[in-house]
Amino acid sequence: MEMHSKSEGNGKPPIIWLNVFVFVSTLLIALIAVPWYGFEHGYSSEHWVWLLITFSFCNLSITAGYHRLWSHKAFEANSVLRAIFALGGAFAMQNSALHWSSDHRIHHKHVDNNDKDPYSAKRGFWFSHIGWMIREYSMNPYENYKNCRDLQRDKILMWQHKYYLALMLAMNFGIPIALGLIYNDLLGMILIVGVLRLVLSHHTTFFINSLAHIWGKQTYTDKNTARDNGILAIFTFGEGYHNYHHIFEHDYRNGIQWWQYDPTKWFIKACSWLKLTSNLKVAPPAKVEQARAQMQLKLTKDKVSALPNGQYIASKLQDEFNTLSKQLNEYYALKKELLEKKRCKLQKQYELSLLKLQIEQMKVKLQQQRKEWSQLTAQYA
Ligand SMILES: [Zn+2]
Ligand SMILES: [Zn+2]
C-alpha cells in the first residue's frame, strides 16, 4: 500500500484514504459481488485451483520472502527465487519488501512498545490487524530505511522498491485478466483471483500481527505478547508459531517440530535441495529446550507458591531445571565436537568411537532427566 502524508486538524493522525478505499472496496466486493456472481453464473474448478495457486504464491512470498528471508536473514536465496518473491510480494499488495522489512525489524526490536512498535498488539486487535495502516501513525520515519542497510545491497529488492507501484498494478490486473482471457471468464477470474485472493491474502497475513499476539500459548517466553497457535499456523503458512519466532527470529522455521504445520519451512527446505536456497539457520537446540523448560519452571513455581510446602517444591524444581540445563549444554557441546572432528579427516578412528560412546552415555542421562522434568512439572500442572 502507498502511504501519503497530509496533516489533519483533529487529535488523531490523518486517515490514509487510499488504503481505506482499497481495504473497504475489496472487502465489500469479496463479501457481496463474489457470492452474487457465483449464484448467477457459477464458478468452475479452474477458479478455485487458481485461487489456491495465487493465494499460496502471495502468502509464501510474504512469509518466506519478505519475512524470513529479507526481514530476518534466516537463509539465503538465489536471484531467481528472490525475483519470484519480489513479484509475489507486489501481487500481495503489502508495500515493497524494503518498506515491509523496515517496519518488521522495528516490530521485533520494540515489540509491544506502543510508541515504537508500528503494529503493537498492546493497542488492541483492530490496531495491530489493520488500524495501523489506515492512519498516518508514522511510528517508523523510514529515514532512508537505515535499519535495512544490508538489504539495500540486494539489486532485486531495490528494483522492486523502485518500481513497486507499476509491479503491484501489473500483477494485480495482469494475472486475473490473463486468466480471465484464457478461461473465457473475465469477470469471474477478476473476482476470484483478483479480489477474493487479495482479501484472503491480506487478512491471513494481518492475523500474524493481531491474533498471533493475542491467542495461543507462550511456550518459550512471556516477555512479549507473541503466541504459539497451531490453528493459526494453518491460515498463515506456518507463522502461527509466533512465540517461538519472537525469541528465535533468525531460525528459518517457526514450527520447529517435524509435525508442526509450517509449509513455509518445508518450502524453504525443499528449495535448498534444488539449490535455490542455502545457509538455512536454526537456533541452537540446547537454547530452545532451555527456554521452554524455563517457562515451565516459571509457571510451575507460580502454581506451587500457594501450597504449604511450596518453597520446598520450588527449590526442587529449580535444582532439576539446573541439572537439565547443564546436561543439555554438555550433550550438544559433545555433538558439536563430533561434527567438527568428523570434518577434519585426520582424526583417529578410536578417538571418534570414544566420543560417540560418550555422546550415547550422555544421551541416556539426558533422556532420564527430561523424563523426570516432565513428570515433575506435570505433577503440579
Ligand atoms: Zn518476524
Ligand atoms: Zn510479532
Image (tube, helix red, strand yellow):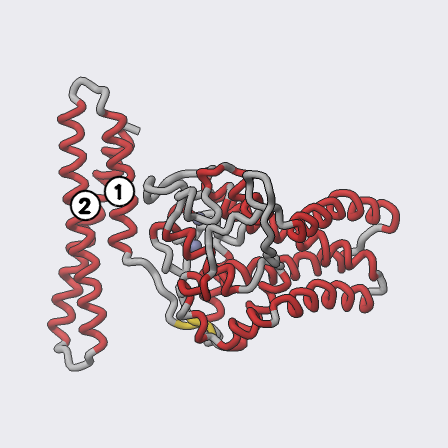
- Residue most extreme to the right: 40
Q: Name the residue tied to disc 1.
A: 293
State whether residue 260 is above or below residue 93.
Answer: above
Nearer-the-camera pick, 166 or 60: 166
Q: What amino acid is labelled 2 in the image?
A: Leu
Q: Position of residue 102 (x, y in %)?
A: 46, 60
| Nearer to me, 141 or 37 | 141
Residue at 42 percent of width and 51 percent of height: 107
Is residue 265 visible in the rendered image? The answer is no
Which residue is identified by label 2?
324
What crowding class fits label 1: few (fewer than 14 Cα within 10 Å), some (14-19), or many (20 or more)?
many
Residue 220 locus on image (x, y percent): 33, 44
Q: Quick one: SS at disc 2?
A: helix
At 62% from the left edge and 50% from the top edge, which residue is drawn?
Answer: 16
Find residue 227 and report its image quarter: top left
Taking the image as shown, residue 256 lies to the left or right of residue 358, namely right
Q: Quadrant of the N terminus?
A: bottom right
The residue lying at 65 percent from left, 69 percent from top is 167
Q: Amino acid at mark 1?
A: Ala
Location of ligand 1 given as a quarter of the image: bottom left
Is residue 154 shown above or below 359? below
Question: Label 1 vs label 2: CA separation?
Answer: 9 Å
- Considering every residue shown, the one lying at the far front of the view is 9
Residue in the image at 64% along x and 63% along y: 91
371 left or right, relative to 261: left
Please indicate, yes or no, whether residue 378 appears anywhere in the rendered image. Answer: yes
Q: Are marks 1 and 2 in contact (CB under 8 Å)?
A: yes
